[in-house]
Image: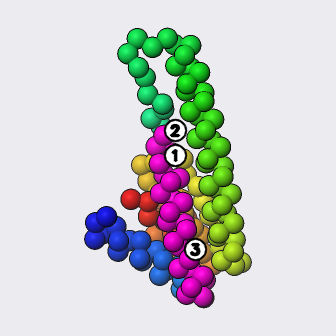
């Protein structure tokens, strides 16, 4: 992990701790959101890339493999979304979470009571996933 990534992760944890009012609760939530956010970003990349193809693979076999791959990704994605919603709800009133399926940007954003943002769309605080 580069210095810039470490600083972004620490800045996110500090902002979440400040917004929640309880340093330990904010740091714990930030730690979990950072871990789950990275996994969520990888899942979104998997949706874009697909399962991959083999040379001379039968199209029916590929379709079956792709369907299994997509089902597994969707199951894991819904589990992570539920888990992150629970973590953010435990922070208190006014906190929310926004999910984005485009892996080119931030895939998870947290909305805070003060309305502070750090993304271009001014929706919330981006969870660093790099």
Residue at 49% x, 11% y is: 58
Residue at 56% x, 85% y is: 24
Secondary structure under tag 2 reads helix
Q: Earlier in the sequence, mark 3 or mark 2?
A: 3
- Quadrant in which residue 95 is drawn: bottom right
The residue carrying pointer 1 sits among few (fewer than 14), some (14 to 19) or many (20 or more) residues within 10 Å by Cα, namely many
Instruction: Please report contact status of discs 2 and 1: CB closer than 8 Å, yes or no.
Output: yes
Q: How is the image coloured?
A: rainbow
Vertical order, 50 against 33 (above or below) = above
Q: CA distance from mark 3 to mark 2?
A: 26 Å
Answer with left or right where residue 120 lies relative to residue 72: left
The residue carrying pointer 2 sits among few (fewer than 14), some (14 to 19) or many (20 or more) residues within 10 Å by Cα, namely some
Foreground: disc 3 or disc 2: 3
**Magenta span: chief secondary structure:** helix
Q: Residue 115 in the image: x percent, y percent? A: 58, 76
Q: Is residue 15 magenta?
A: no
Q: Which of the two residues, 79 or 108, is positioned nearer the viewer here?
A: 79
Mark number displayed over residue 43: 1
Instruction: Please report contact status of discs 3 and 1: CB closer than 8 Å, yes or no.
Output: no
Q: Quadrant of the N terminus?
A: bottom left
Instruction: Please report contact status of discs 3 and 2: CB closer than 8 Å, yes or no.
Output: no
Residue at 64% x, 55% y is: 81
Note whether residue 94 is visible: no
Q: Which residue is mark 3?
A: 29
Q: Quadrant of the C terminus?
A: bottom left
Q: CA distance from mark 2 to mark 1?
A: 6 Å
Q: Which residue is mark 2?
A: 47
Q: Residue 111 in the image: x percent, y percent? A: 59, 70
Vertical order, 29 against 22 (above or below) = above
Q: Is residue 29 magenta?
A: yes
Which span of residues is magenta-colored? 20-47
């Amino acid at each position: 992990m580069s210095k810039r990534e470490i600083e972004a992760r620490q800045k996110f944890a500090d902002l979440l701790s400040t917004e929640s009012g309880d340093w330990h609760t904010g740091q714990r939530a930030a730690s979990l959101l950072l871990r789950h956010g990275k996994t969520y970003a990888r899942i979104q990349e998997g949706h874009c890339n697909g399962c991959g193809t083999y040379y001379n693979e039968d199209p029916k076999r590929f379709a079956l493999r792709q369907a299994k791959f997509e089902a597994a990704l969707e199951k894991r994605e819904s589990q992570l979304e539920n888990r992150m919603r629970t973590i953010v709800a435990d922070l208190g009133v006014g906190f929310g979470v926004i999910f984005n399926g485009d892996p080119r940007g931030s895939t998870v954003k947290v909305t805070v009571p003060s309305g502070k943002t750090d993304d271009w769309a001014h929706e919330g605080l981006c969870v660093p996933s790099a």
